[in-house]
Image: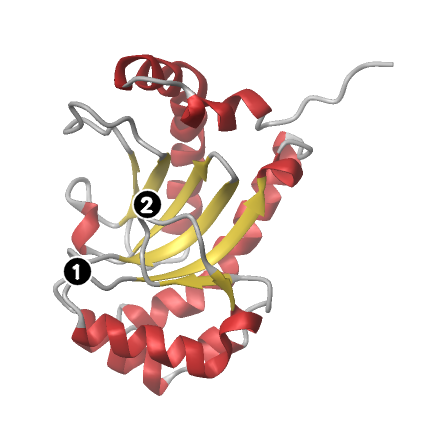
């Protein structure tokens, strides 16, 4: 019987256990970044088709690192060719423990107050997401709460913090445990990622003030 080809493999996730910056970066560049480039082209086109501007892919290069190897990596999507971190953006990426498909407002964003106010006025776009989707206040940490666990009060707390704490962030999306991710064919993964981005687009609309 032919073995089923999956898109992500245990080796992809195990990249983040490789010791040393140089060895880990080499593995990242050979194993994972070709997939990020492929996903980048596909989903930049998919997001551009919504008419919210032309989206461009940004594969994380981790170029500033000199000692500590990256603990996660990603491809981001934003309607700019460079400097995406100051804008709300989508990401597909990996930690050692899970895969993530998220919409992120990170600390470089200059409009956190406005974004908070728009989301607070349209909380339904967050509370109506699937209860297994996650929310987080820090993209540098792998842990996150599900929307069900956080509840409306927890989401409110994250938004309050986004507005009042300089380093605060707001992440919403989906985590897929590695054990599940490594069972998905390419088609199944692409469909899952597309469904997730489509579900997050109404949130993006509110964030950018297009609601």
Seen as rendered, the residue at the extreme right is 1
Mark number, residue 1: none
Q: Position of residue 88 (x, y in %)?
A: 27, 58
For the residues labelled 2 and 1, the Cα–Cα distance comes to 15 Å
Q: Residue at x 44, y 53 (%)?
A: 143
Q: Residue furthest bottom?
A: 121
Classify the position of the N terminus by image quarter: top right
Q: Residue at x 69, y 33 (%)?
A: 183
Question: Going 31% across and 19% down the picture, which residue do you hit?
Answer: 25
The answer to whether residue 50 is visible is yes
| Disc 1, SS | loop
Q: Please tell me whether mark 2 sits on a helix, a strand or a loop.
A: strand
Nearer the observer, 152 or 103: 152
Q: Is residue 21 left or right of residue 4?
A: left
Q: Which residue is denoted by mark 2 in the rendering?
A: 77
Quadrant of residue 118 in the image?
Answer: bottom left
For residue 191, above or below residue 69: below
The image's colour scheme reads: secondary structure
Q: Residue 109: which numbered mark, if any?
A: 1
Q: Could you tell me which residue is drawn at 36 percent across and 49 percent down? A: 141
């Amino acid at each position: 019987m032919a073995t089923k080809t999956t898109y992500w493999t245990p080796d992809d996730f195990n990249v983040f256990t490789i010791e040393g910056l140089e060895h880990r970066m080499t593995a990242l560049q050979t194993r994972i970044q070709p997939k990020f480039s492929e996903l980048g082209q596909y989903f930049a086109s998919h997001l551009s088709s919504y008419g919210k501007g032309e989206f461009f892919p940004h594969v994380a290069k981790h170029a500033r690192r000199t000692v500590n190897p990256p603990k996660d990596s990603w491809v981001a999507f934003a309607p700019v060719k460079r400097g995406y971190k100051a804008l709300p953006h989508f990401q597909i990426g990996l930690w050692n423990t899970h895969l993530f498909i998220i919409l992120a407002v990170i600390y470089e964003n200059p409009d956190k107050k406005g974004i908070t106010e728009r989301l607070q006025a349209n909380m339904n776009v967050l509370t109506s997401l699937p209860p297994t989707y996650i929310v987080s206040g820090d993209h540098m940490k792998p842990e996150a709460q599900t929307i069900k666990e956080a509840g409306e009060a927890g989401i409110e707390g994250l938004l309050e913090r986004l507005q009042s704490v300089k380093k605060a962030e707001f992440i919403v999306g989906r985590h897929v445990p590695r054990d599940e991710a490594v069972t998905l064919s390419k088609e199944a993964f692409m469909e899952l990622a597309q469904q997730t981005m489509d579900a997050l687009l109404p949130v993006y609309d509110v964030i950018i003030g297009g609601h």
